[in-house]
Amino acid sequence: MLKWALIFALISVVAGVLGFGGLAAGAAGIAKLLFFVFLFVFLLFLVLAALGVGALRK
């Protein structure tokens, strides 16, 4: 997901340089959304791993 956020950020920068303001704003919005979703999932998994959820117990 982080890969897609970086791709949309790059598209936003290129579109902005070429003068496509609407496309740049849209791509930046998608990149921001994907980044925050990635950050939330990453932190969730980090907390679950710290708590030991999902560890095999016998």
Image (cartoon, rainbow, N blue to C red):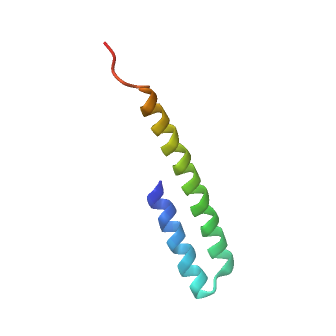
The percent position of residue 34, horizontal first and vertical second, equals: 56, 56
Q: Quadrant of residue 32?
A: bottom right
Outermost residue toward the left in this view = 58
> Most extreme residue toward the right, as rendered?
22
For image coordinates 52% across by 50% down, the residue present is: 38
On screen, residue 36 versus residue 46, left or right, reads right
Answer with the quarter of the image where residue 17 lies.
bottom right
Could you tell me residue 50's position as x and y percent? 43, 32
Q: Is 14 placed above or below 38 here?
A: below
The foreground one among 46 and 32 is 46
Residue 16 pos. (x, y %): 60, 81
Residue found at x 61% / y 56%:
33
Q: In the figure, residue 24 lies in which quadrant?
A: bottom right
Residue appearing at x 52%, y 38% in the figure: 44
Quarter of the figure with the C terminus: top left
Give the percent coordinates (x, y) of residue 7. 48, 67
The structure residue drawn at horizontal position 42% and vertical position 33%, both measured from the top left corner, is 49
